Image: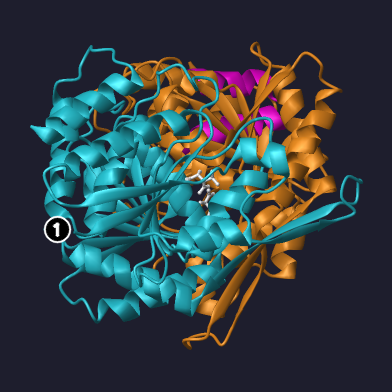
Chain colours: A orange, B cyan
């Protein structure tokens, strides 16, 4: 009997509600196997910070490291100064656990209404770099709060960091029917970082001769996501551009209630982390209004990452079937979770 | 008799074609007045660079400075290494002439098809900072081309620079019926720059007590531009976020063929510059396929900036009338320009 040692970081706001449903579906997916889920709940987020001033201690991190994977709900609360939990907890997890592949599918499921008039088929995946770029926290300010303040933010990009994520993206493109990779950057302005990305894509392409590539400036990418999202297969991009494009991708495929993500450490030197793209949504927290589907789809990614491909496929199929019949129905967070678990069990 | 001393930088690709039409409409708008347009054409762009290796010399810049305004078509060509003309010419103009307000309306004109299923009324303006942020060119790389390369890009933000553009944005919001200003940034990650922007908006709000404000992270802004663009009135944001959001804004309002922009020096210490948001589009250059409307709307902004409000309104009205009757018609670049000039003259 193998077990899944799962670290659960429900976090703040609707994170608590959606994670509960994600776990329900995870249990259902594994019910007919001999695999058990051993959960460890971690008290991290706004409440912990208010009580102790801590965001993520060395002990927390060491304990999390002993797990096979992390399921995360959402982090953040308006009562905590902006940046404290994002930098001190969420990004600290991604960076410390070397989640250099932030995988975010952009898929329009049948039955889901897109805000686009003619969405066409949308089925791409964004490979967002997760450990470099403008997210490194390498900024600062002088004369802060005076008329002479200067506030800088440094985007740090390394050949090591860019190459490993680009190689991962090529491998994913290679495994997909269309075998196409689009690099998104802004190399006509951010010439140093941009040219590093461009040269790297050209070089790694030699290892994947079947994969075709093209390039878009990030501004142009937002246009194509609006006018022709079908053109995308795999997108590889930096941490900040990936943040922006994946929210837009969520919007055109039915909203962040459906958008899953995986923060992957492909070298498996630390647990990967699975989380919905949405935030803690304090305005609707505790009311059973949150859609747990994004978390459930993240659970499907978790199962696939741990090698449970059949179970992962079952979860995604359950979501697809539910979405196909969803129009007009209003269900609570728990009802949707129960329905999905039921479909998985059937 | 006053004259308009106009510096004309047609540039590359379709820039040449659309500027010709922009000038046609400008002449038409002033035909019944005693104002003459004195044009000076500047040979800048890919051809000049190929011939001389120059992008924008001190002499060019000094000559341009003596003008009242600049009309620019588009800069860039695939035969020139990425970044050379963008940094050495286009951005050099914006930075040298202190174009700190990059004004880009997002307006859906009646008759124009939006790719959004339910666009609603769209009528906002983006005030994009034009002289700071990740565009300052403050980056570099070491061990370039080796596995140990590190490529950095520095976003520089100053209280001076942020405050002046925020004040300009508040003044614009104050002058609009809805009087609403949305700050877009990413202060939960880019904490230093982001907090400078946030504090500045809070402080300057005291001078404009009638203006209501809100804040969106840039990723969330792309969602609302997809699901509810009507919520926006004035958006103020940094140089890079503004670049991204204004292309998305163009997409939802009918495409970059219609998107105008003004690079404004509000202190009038140097000429402001008016240019379509689109690029040089080498794939369709020279074929009469480019839509000159974005340039014509930029000419309307030019006229307004120079105090010719009635003429500016006439040009915008001509465009609006043309767009309202455009459906299904195919016209060449010159035909659209001629039709617009005709409407302005009527
Ligand atoms: C909360 C924030 C730090 C985070 C990010 O910017 O990565 C979020 O927007 C996301 O996309 O997961
Ligand atoms: C060509 C490029 C440097 C420019 C920019 O990034 O500002 C363009 O995209 C624009 O928006 O005017």
Q: Residue at x 39, y 76 (%)?
A: B200
Q: Is residue A296 magenta?
A: yes
Residue A328 visible in the shown view:
no
Residue A66: image location, x then y, percent = 78, 52
- Identify the subunit bearing mark 1: B
Is A300 on the left or on the right of A255, as rendered? right
Q: Is residue A283 left or right of residue A71?
A: left
Q: Quadrant of residue A306?
A: top right
Give the residue number, with chain letter if any, for mark 1.
Answer: B178
10 Å neighbourhood of mark 1: few (<14), some, or many (≥20)? some
Residue extent of the magenta highlight: A294-318
**What residue do we see at 20% from left, 52% from top?**
B35
Residue lying at the far front of the rendered structure: B1
Residue A61 is left or right of residue B89, and the answer is right
B286 and B231: which is toward the camera: B286
Q: Pinpoint residue A345: horizontal percent, then vertical percent.
A: 50, 20
Queried whether the magenta region covers residue A116, the answer comes back as: no
């Amino acid at each position: 009997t193998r077990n899944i040692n799962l670290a659960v970081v429900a976090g703040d706001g609707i994170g608590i509600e959606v994670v509960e449903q994600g776990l329900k579906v995870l249990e259902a997916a594994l019910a007919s196997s001999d695999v058990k889920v051993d959960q460890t709940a971690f008290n991290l987020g706004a409440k912990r910070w208010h009580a102790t001033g801590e965001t993520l201690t060395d002990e927390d991190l060491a304990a999390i490291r002993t797990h096979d994977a992390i399921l995360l709900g959402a982090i953040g609360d308006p009562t905590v100064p902006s940046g404290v939990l994002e930098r001190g907890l969420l990004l600290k997890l991604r960076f410390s656990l070397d989640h250099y592949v932030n995988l975010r599918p952009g898929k329009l499921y049948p039955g889901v209404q897109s805000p686009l008039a003619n969405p066409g088929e949308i089925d791409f995946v964004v490979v967002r770099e997760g450990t470099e770029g403008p997210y490194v926290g390498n900024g600062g300010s002088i004369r802060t709060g005076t008329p002479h303040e200067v506030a800088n933010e440094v985007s740090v990009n390394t050949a090591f960091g860019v190459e490993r994520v680009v190689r991962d993206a090529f491998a994913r493109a290679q495994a997909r029917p269309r075998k196409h990779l689009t690099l998104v950057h802004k190399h006509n302005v951010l010439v140093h970082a941009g040219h590093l990305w461009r040269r790297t894509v050209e070089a790694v392409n030699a290892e994947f001769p079947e994969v075709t590539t093209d390039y878009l400036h990030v501004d142009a990418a937002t246009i194509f996501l609006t006018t022709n999202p079908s053109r995308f297969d795999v997108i590889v991009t930096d941490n900040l551009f990936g943040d922006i494009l994946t929210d837009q991708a969520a919007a055109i495929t039915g909203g962040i209630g459906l958008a899953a993500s995986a923060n992957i450490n492909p070298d498996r030197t630390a647990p990967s982390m699975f989380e919905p793209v949405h935030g803690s949504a304090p305005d609707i927290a505790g009311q059973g209004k949150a859609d747990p589907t994004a978390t459930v789809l993240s659970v499907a990614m978790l199962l696939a990452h741990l090698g449970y491909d059949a179970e992962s496929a079952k979860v995604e199929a359950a979501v697809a079937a539910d979405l196909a019949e969803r129009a007009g129905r209003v269900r609570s967070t728990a009802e949707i979770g129960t329905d999905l678990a039921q479909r998985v069990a059937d």
